[in-house]
Image: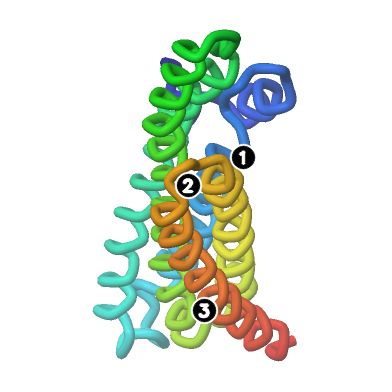
Amino acid sequence: MEDFSKKSCEEFVEVLASKAPVPGGGGASALVGAIGVALANMVGNLTVGKKKYADVEDEMKRLMEQCQTLEKELLQLIARDAKVFEPLSKAYGMPRETEEEKAKKAEVMAIVLKDACSVPYEIMEKCCEAIDLMDDFAKKGSRLAVSDAGCGAICCSAALQAASLNVLINTKAMQDRAYAEAVNQKAHAMLSEYTKKANEVYQYVAEQF
């Protein structure tokens, strides 16, 4: 399986636009989330070492360490999303003419749907972690880069929402409705809390100009 996180921007977008099953919405979500985190990290790098912001330097360094971890994890999730989605795309094409074939397809689908759902769900979690950091970058980071903190928050919010659609389309197809509804409930809770948080950061930044 190719690691699409190693592709150039041009190559990634070209494959994304093609008929190829991967990368898709999940991989795109992870990339947008990683870009959002990188923007926050840039705010930190433009803050650290400046005399004017000496009182927040240690805090910025801690936030940047968290960002570096999240950035790497989100980039890794691009490849993982491709890895778990490909078996699902193949499973949809399995024959279901006989009762035996139907049973086999249902058995495979139960496994691959959960796998395919797990990665975008994790992308959502990582985006929530990132959004939790954005307020501090916006309010304590260099004023010269405050717009980048707002951009980062909105990118992570977009990635969160995009990843949620990849969760919900998979839970809709699940036969195990109890499992599906439990995942849906958690996904909606993340959306409700963190899109609001990200928008608050955006509004704060927008009011600075």
Q: Is residue 85 above or below residue 204?
A: above
The residue where tag 3 is placed is: 193
Viewer-proximal residue among 23 and 204: 23
Q: What's under tag 3, amino acid-wise?
A: Glu
- Measured as percent of width and height from the top left, residue 58 is found at 24, 79
According to the image, label 1 marks what residue? 25
Within 10 Å of disc 1 (Cα), the crowding (few <14, some 14-19, many 20+) is many
- Does the rendering let one see residue 6? no
| Image-based side of 43 in relation to 129, left or right | right
Question: Is residue 43 rendered to the left or right of residue 168?
Answer: left
Q: Which residue is at a point 55% across and 69% down the rendered structure image?
A: 191
Q: Secondary structure at mark 3?
A: helix
Q: Residue at horizontal 39%, vertical 85%? A: 53
Distance in Å between CA atoms under marks 1 and 3: 22 Å
Residue furthest out toward the front: 99
Residue at the spot of label 2: 120
Residue at screen point 43% across, 23% down: 3
The percent coordinates of residue 90 (x first, y second) are: 53, 16
Front residue of this view, candidates 49 and 38: 38
